Image (tube, rainbow, N blue to C red):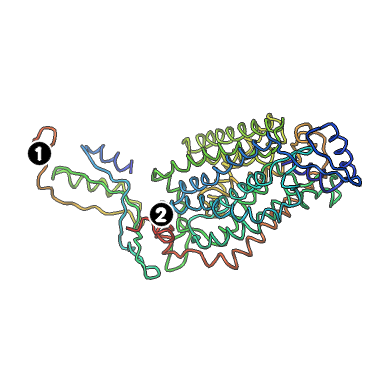
Amino acid sequence: MPEVLKALVDSGLQGATVYREVEGMGGEGGVVVIGGEVYDALTPRVAVDIVVDEKEVEKVVNTILKTAKTGSVGDGRIFVLSVEQAYRIRTGEKLC
Amino acid sequence: MRMCFQIARMMFEKNSEKYGGIQRDLSCFNPGVQVRDICNTVFHPMQVDQASTLWTAVGGVLVFLMVPAIGFLEAGLVRRRNVINGLMKGLLAVAVFLPIWFAVFPIYFGSVIKDGFYPTGDGVGIPMYIYAFFLGVFGAVTLALIFAGAPERLKFSGWLLFAVFFSAVQWPLVASWVWGGGWLASLGDITGLAPGLGVRDFAGGTVVHAYAGLAGLIITMLLGPSLRRYQLNGGVRVRAEFVYKEAVEAKRPELSLAIIGTSLLFFGWFGFNGGSTLVVSEQTGYAIANTAVAGSLGGFVALLLSKAAERAWSPIMAISGVLGGLVMITPLAGFIEPALAFVAGIVASVITYYGIKIVERFYVIDDPVGSLPVHGFNGIVGSMLVPVLAHPEISGMRGLIYGGGFGFVAVQWLGMVLALGFVAATTYVFVRLLLIKYRTTHEEEIVGLDAIDHKVGYV
C-alpha cells in the first residue's frame, strides 16, 4: 500500500481515502454452508477512493496497475465512475 | 519446589525413625505444640506457617492471571476470525482445569500432605488447599499454553475433550512424578547415579513449558497446518508462500492484545517463579531477581537482534524474547546466581529469535504464536542447564560448574527424556484416536472458529 500511494503522490495526486479494514468476495466465493448453516467467508481487503479530474484518470489508473500488481489472484480491481457534483464543506464552494 | 522434595522425603518417606526422634526433641522446646507421646510415636497437630501460606496464596493468585493472559497472547497473533476462540480457551483453561484438579489432587499428591497441611517445617505447614491451588494454576497455565501452540484448527469440543483428559490424568501424573515426591524426583537414587538427587525443576521448565511446547508441537503436526500456510490447488493442499504474521502485516488492533497478554504474563511470572519456593526464604529473593533479569534481557536482546536483521523494533520479537527469557529462567530461578541469570536471558533471546526463524523458514510446523521455539526450546534448554548451573549454597545442589558430578546431569537429562516421552506418547495417542475428528475443514477454517464454534461475528 505505501508503495502505491507513493507512486500516486509522485505523479501529482492531491488526495485519497483508504479503507484498511474491509472485507469482500470475488470469484472464490464469500459464502459457505456448513451443517445447514450459512456463514460468510469474506476475504480481508483494502479499498481506496480517489477522485481526480477527468484528464488525470488514465494516469492514475496506469500508476495503480503498475505498482499494485503482484501477478497473483487477489491483486484487486479498479473501477472508474463519474462524479456528478462536489462541494468543499469549509467554504461552500462548488468544485464541479 | 526444591523444598518440597526435601521436606516430603524428610517427613514421610525415608529416615522416619531418625527424624521422628529429632521432632520429638524439638517439640519439647515449643510450648505451643501439643505432644502426645505414646509408644515412641509423635503426634503434632499442624499449625499454619503464616508467612509461607500467605506467600504461596499470593503467588497462586499471580499465576492465575497468567492463564487468561495466554489467551490474550494467542488472540493477538491469530487470524481475526479466531480471536474470540483464543480468548475463550485462555479463560476456559481455568474453568475446566481447576474443578477437576481439586477433585483429583488428593489422589496424586496425597503422599506429600500431612493432616491437611503441606509441611514446611517442624509442626507447621501450608494448608492443603492453598498448596493445591498453587499447583493447580500451574496446570491451567500448561493447558492454556498447549493450545496456544495449536491454534485456529481444532474445534472447541475437541479442546474440551483434551482438557478433561489433561486435567484428570496427564498433567497430574507428570507433576506428581516431579513435584509430588514421585519416582522422577528420586531418579538419582533409583538409578544409583546421583544419590539424593533426581529431576529438579524449580518452577516448571519441564513440567509446564517444555511439556506445553512438546504437546503443542505434536497436536499441530498431527492436525496439519492452517490455511495461512497452504493453498488448495485442485483440492490438494499445496504449501503457500511464506506469509508474515497477519497481525503485523495489517497492523491489526488485536496485536495489542498480544502485548497486553505478555505484560500480564511477565507480571504473573513473579508469582510463578517467586512463589515456587513456597517457604519464604533467601531463595525467594534469588528467584525474583533472576526472573526479572532474564525476562527483561530476553526481550531486549531479541529486540536488538530483530533491529539488526530486519531493521524493525519488532513487537513479535519483543514479546517472544520476554517470554523466552522467562521460560528459560523458570527451571533455574531459585537455583542460580543472578549473574548467571544475565547469561540465561541472553542465551534465551538468541534461542528464541533464531528458533522462530528456523521454525518459520523450514516450515517445521505452523505455529503463529511461537509456542515451540519460545516454550519448547527454552524450557528444554533451561531444564537441561539445572544440573550444570545449580549453585550449591542457593539450591543445595552442586552444579557441574561448581564441581558437581556428571551423575546429576545424566539423571536430569534422563528424567526429562522419560517425562517428555510420556507426554509425547500420550498426546500422540490421544490426538490420533480422538482429537483428529475435531480438525476443522478447509471451509470451516476460512469462516473461522469464532463463527463456527461460538456464533460470534455471525451477523
In the image, taking residue B447 as reference, residue B213 lies left or right, namely: right
Q: Residue at x 81, y 39 (%)?
A: B34
Q: Nearer the viewer, residue A20 or B207?
A: B207
Residue under the image location 13 percent in, 50 percent down: A82
Residue under disc 1 on the same chain as residue under disc 2:
no
Q: Is residue A82 above or below residue B299?
A: below
Residue B210: mark: none
- Residue nearer the viewer, B202 or B344: B202
Tell me if mark 2 has few (under 14), some (14-19) or many (20+) residues whose alpha carbon lies within 10 angstroms of its own. Answer: many
Residue shown at the point (55%, 40%) measured from the top left = B265
The image quadrant of residue B378 is top right
The chain under label 2 reads: B
Frontmost residue, A84 versus B263: B263
Q: Amino acid at mark 2?
A: Arg
**Can you identify the residue that label 1 sits on?**
A95
SS state under label 1: loop
Badge 1 amino acid: Leu
Q: Secondary structure at mark 2?
A: helix
Left or right: B403 in relation to B291: right
Residue located 64% across and 56% down the image? B103
Report the mark closest to the observer, 1 or 2.
2
Which residue is outermost to the bottom? A36
The crowding category of the residue bearing disc 1, from other C-alpha atoms within 10 Å (few below 14, some 14 to 19, many at least 20), is few
The subunit letter for the residue under badge 1 reads A
Say whether residue B446 is left or right of residue B139.
Answer: left
The location of residue B133, given as percent across then percent down, is 63, 46
Residue B402 on image: x %, y %: 80, 33
Label 1, label 2: how many angstroms apart (C-alpha)?
A: 42 Å
Image coordinates for residue B205, horizontal then vertical, percent = 66, 45
Label number found at residue B81: 2
Instruction: Find residue B395 and report its horizontal and vertical position in percent.
Output: 76, 35
Q: Relative to A44, is B93 on the left or the right?
A: right
